[in-house]
């Protein structure tokens, strides 16, 4: 560590950093000539350094195509001032348009802002871990000459490519807000639920795509500058959402193929689960959920405008600004917050929607403004409502009664994975953990969430537990080295400070789950979608690769480097090495 990494100064000084970011991308900016610039602030950070570097991210400007490392960006100025009775250093990062430094800063600041969206008090209210050892995710803002951008757990990095479009304009994917927010979200979800990238269920990867797109969309609605300018535009109030999708980045068009996948443009769709069920492409699949989320956001906004209070206040720019911001906040709470409560092993779209509705029912039983009705209606239209599936996914009706639980010691549960294990182990029956299974606690965390009007919610401790069940594959597909797939059973439990159960999402190894997993694994094998002898996770071109685990068995892993690649049909990108 150099002295640059740890700026000296009195210990009581806070450090914050500030940077301008593109809210869409430079091409969208030139096309419309207004509003895609915002500001990202890194607050409460102790380690701002050149790169830019902060406690959770470090920019490494390495270009694999040129095999060259470029110099890190230093802040432009450091302002010392006092705020709220405390000394503070404010680091300003800025660079002129078209420079490498601009790309470094934009990628870093957008990534920081995306992490803050998830860690917000309205969403998780806690720090999100990465899926790898180490506290900093590397960002390679100009990583290769290729129409591709991806997150990789193996390299602990976000890789952003650059290429030339049809008209030979240079396109840098790290300048696109939607792409950076999307890729950062893959890393965030992988940190929260690492098994999702090891699942053969196509919903798990589709869910990854959904989280990326919904985060890109909702983070825009946290930008005051964006909203302020949005409500001043001479469009009909109800057309705001057209505008948001219309501004889908040109970069996205080049990177993800045709207009079918310019993240936000495709968010306004009427797709149903049935229509995508047979499609293995995670992007196509994820669009059902993204469409659902967009519908919820729009529905909440309209409900607020149409409410008695909304009509009384009128629909001036100030009112629209406030209602858009509020609707977005409620959408985050309704759709993003439950991600912290999902089971660890796998996720299907219907399970996700069912948990979203159950959590909302638990916290907002009355549904005064009819938000849940809006979500239920949208879910039904898309065939995602739990009542439309044979799937037994009961959460509340089976919640064990608190007084039957043993070892209700919150200090012990919070202390470590071992402490949390003791609690679950003492209550195996209640949590449907078979007596003969060696289960593991794969995550423990306590949140500090906010309620409306700045009130604090009771902190919840969230524990994820998991065990593995082997699902044998039929002999005729065993020509490959893979003779079984792993079903990760388990669940997620949330308790309050008195160890009262707040939420439980079990995922038991039912026949339905086993059959689904077997079916998907067979399809991967027959489609030759698995690379059984990958040289490295980054080189293979197949969607999955297999690796050996400690016991010598084969484990599958999604090849994230190929998740977005090969879709740039119109782009004239060369092959990256
Ligand atoms: Zn993606």
Image (spheres, rainbow, N blue to C red):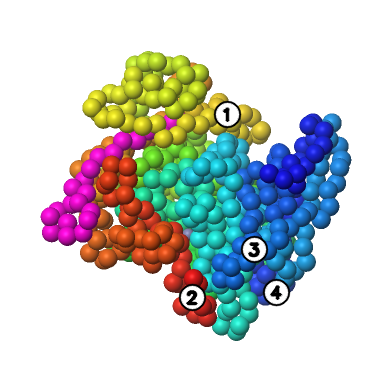
Q: Nearer the viewer, residue 104 or 211?
A: 104
Q: Nearer the viewer, residue 113 or 438?
A: 438
Q: Which residue is mark 3?
A: 69
Mark in front: 1 vs 2: 2
Specify few, some or many for label 3: CA neighbours under 10 Å numbering under 14, 14-19, or 20 or more.
few
Specify few, some or many for label 1: CA neighbours under 10 Å numbering under 14, 14-19, or 20 or more.
some
Q: Which residue is mark 2?
A: 575
Q: Magenta segment range?
A: 462-484
Q: Which residue is mark 4?
A: 30
Residue at 66 percent across and 33 percent down: it is: 454
Tag 4 or tag 3, which sits nearer the N-term? 4
Which element type, helix, strand or loop, lies under badge 1? Answer: loop
470 within the magenta span: yes
Which element type, helix, strand or loop, lies under badge 2? Answer: loop
Mark 4: C-beta under 8 Å from nearest atom of ligand 1: no
Distance (Cα) linking label 2 and label 4: 29 Å
Does residue 506 show up?
Answer: no
Which element type, helix, strand or loop, lies under badge 4? Answer: helix
Residue 569 position within the rendered picture, expressed as x and y whole percent measured from the top left: 46, 78
Q: Answer above or below: position of 462 versus 21.
A: above
């Amino acid at each position: 560590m150099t002295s640059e990494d740890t700026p000296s100064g009195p210990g009581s000084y806070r450090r914050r950093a500030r940077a301008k970011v593109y809210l869409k991308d430079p091409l969208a900016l030139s096309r419309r000539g207004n509003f895609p610039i915002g500001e990202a602030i890194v607050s409460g950070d102790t380690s701002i350094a050149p790169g830019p570097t902060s406690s959770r991210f470090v920019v490494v400007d390495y270009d694999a195509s040129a095999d060259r490392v470029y110099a890190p960006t230093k802040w432009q100025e450091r302002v010392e001032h006092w705020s709220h009775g405390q000394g503070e250093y404010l680091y300003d990062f800025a660079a002129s348009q078209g420079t490498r430094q601009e790309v470094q800063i934009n990628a870093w600041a957008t990534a920081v802002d995306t992490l803050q969206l998830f860690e917000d008090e309205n969403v998780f209210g806690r720090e999100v871990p990465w899926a790898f050892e180490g506290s900093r995710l590397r960002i390679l803002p100009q990583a290769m000459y290729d129409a591709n951008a991806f997150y990789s757990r193996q390299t602990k990095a976000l890789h952003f490519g650059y290429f030339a479009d049809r008209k030979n304009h240079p396109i840098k994917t790290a300048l696109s807000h939607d792409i950076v927010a999307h890729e950062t979200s893959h890393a965030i979800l992988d940190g929260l639920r690492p098994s999702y990238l090891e699942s053969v269920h196509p919903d798990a990867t589709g869910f990854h795509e959904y989280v990326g797109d919904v985060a890109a969309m909702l983070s825009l609605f946290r930008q005051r500058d964006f909203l302020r300018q949005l409500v001043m535009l001479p469009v009909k109030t109800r057309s705001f959402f057209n505008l948001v999708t219309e501004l889908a980045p040109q970069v996205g068009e080049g990177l993800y193929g045709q207009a079918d996948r310019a993240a936000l443009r495709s968010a306004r769709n009427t797709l149903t689960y049935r229509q995508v069920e047979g499609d293995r492409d995670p992007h196509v699949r994820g669009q059902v959920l993204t469409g659902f989320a967009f519908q919820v956001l729009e529905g909440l906004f309209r409900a607020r405008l149409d409410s008695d209070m909304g009509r009384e206040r009128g629909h001036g720019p100030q009112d629209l600004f406030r209602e858009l911001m509020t609707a977005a906040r409620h959408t985050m709470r309704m759709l993003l917050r439950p991600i912290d409560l999902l089971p660890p092993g796998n996720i299907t779209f219907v399970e996700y929607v069912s948990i979203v509705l159950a959590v909302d029912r638990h916290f907002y039983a009355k549904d005064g403004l009819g938000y849940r009705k809006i979500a239920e209606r949208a879910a039904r239209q898309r065939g995602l409502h739990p009542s439309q599936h044979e799937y037994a996914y009961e959460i509340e009706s089976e919640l064990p009664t608190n007084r039957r639980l043993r070892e209700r010691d919150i200090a012990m549960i919070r202390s470590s994975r071992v402490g949390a294990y003791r609690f679950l182990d003492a209550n195996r029956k209640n949590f449907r953990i078979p007596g003969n299974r060696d289960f593991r606690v794969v995550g423990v965390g306590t949140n500090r969430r906010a309620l409306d009007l700045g009130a604090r919610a009771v902190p919840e401790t969230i524990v994820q537990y998991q065990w593995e069940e082997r699902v044998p594959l039929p002999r005729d597909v065993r020509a490959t080295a893979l003779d079984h797939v792993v079903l990760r059973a388990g669940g997620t439990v949330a308790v309050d400070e008195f160890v009262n159960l707040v939420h439980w999402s079990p995922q038991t190894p039912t026949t339905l789950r086993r059959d689904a997993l077997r079916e998907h694994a067979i399809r991967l094998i027959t489609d030759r979608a698995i690379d059984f002898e990958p040289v490295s996770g980054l080189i293979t071109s197949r969607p999955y690769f297999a690796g050996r685990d400690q016991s010598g068995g084969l484990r599958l892993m999604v090849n994230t480097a190929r998740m977005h690649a090969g879709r740039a049909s119109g782009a004239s990108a060369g092959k990256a090495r």
